[in-house]
């Protein structure tokens, strides 16, 4: 006897943990648990990310190199959504497809990360 198969609509699983644009465990490991250093690094990243996005908009020819720089910084602090978006922008530039959408996604990821950083640094 074979079991009957029923068609079921796919339904995404809920996230295992609430989404956060920052992996604070990663950041803690990278700063050896030094909370003062974590705050300094987060503040520097937030400022750098804003400057790099502005530079990408002002000098499009440099966008690939700037996205690469942002990707490395983001990985260092645990802003993996920013790093992934920067990598996607690098790919879009290299292939010549989807650059505006990739840049918009990067801006959104940076905005989310900067908001999370602001919340952490708020006294």
Image (cartoon, rainbow, N blue to C red):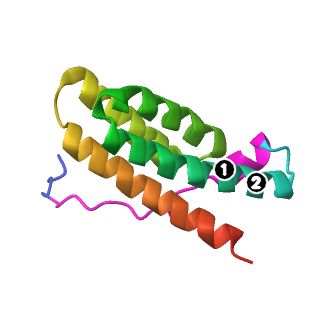
- Which secondary structure, mark 1? helix
Mark 2 lies on a secondary structure that is helix
Mark 1 vs mark 2, CA separation in Å: 6 Å
Against 26, residue 95 (above or below) is: above
Q: Residue at x 30, y 27 (%)?
A: 61
Whether the magenta-drawn stretch holds residue 35 is answered as no
Q: Residue 104 at x, y = what percent?
A: 28, 51
> Mark 1–mark 2 contact, CB under 8 Å?
yes
Which of the 4 image quadrants contains residue 119? bottom right
Question: Relative to 115, is 46 above or below?
Answer: above
From the viewer's perspective, is 66 left or right of 23?
left
Specify start and end residues of the magenta stretch as a single range.
8-30
Residue at the far top: name it.
94
10 in magenta: yes
Quadrant placement of the C terminus: bottom right
* Residue drawn at point x = 33 percent, y = 42 percent: 58
Quarter of image, res 64: top left
Count of numbered tags: 2
Residue at image x 37%, y 47%?
106
Left or right of residue 87: residue 122: right
Q: What's the mark number on residue 40?
A: 2
From the image, give the main secondary structure of the stretch colored magenta: loop
């Amino acid at each position: 006897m074979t079991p009957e198969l029923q068609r079921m609509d796919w339904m995404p699983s809920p996230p295992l943990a609430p989404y956060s644009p920052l992996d604070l465990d990663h950041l803690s490991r990278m700063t050896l648990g030094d909370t003062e250093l974590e705050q300094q690094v987060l503040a520097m990243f937030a400022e750098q990310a804003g400057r790099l996005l502005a530079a990408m908009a002002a000098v499009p020819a440099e966008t690939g190199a700037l996205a690469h720089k942002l990707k490395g910084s983001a990985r260092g602090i645990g802003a993996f959504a920013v790093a992934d978006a920067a990598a996607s922008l690098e790919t879009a530039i290299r292939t010549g497809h989807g650059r505006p959408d990739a840049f918009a996604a990067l801006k959104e990821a940076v905005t989310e990360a900067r908001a999370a950083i602001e919340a952490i640094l708020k006294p």
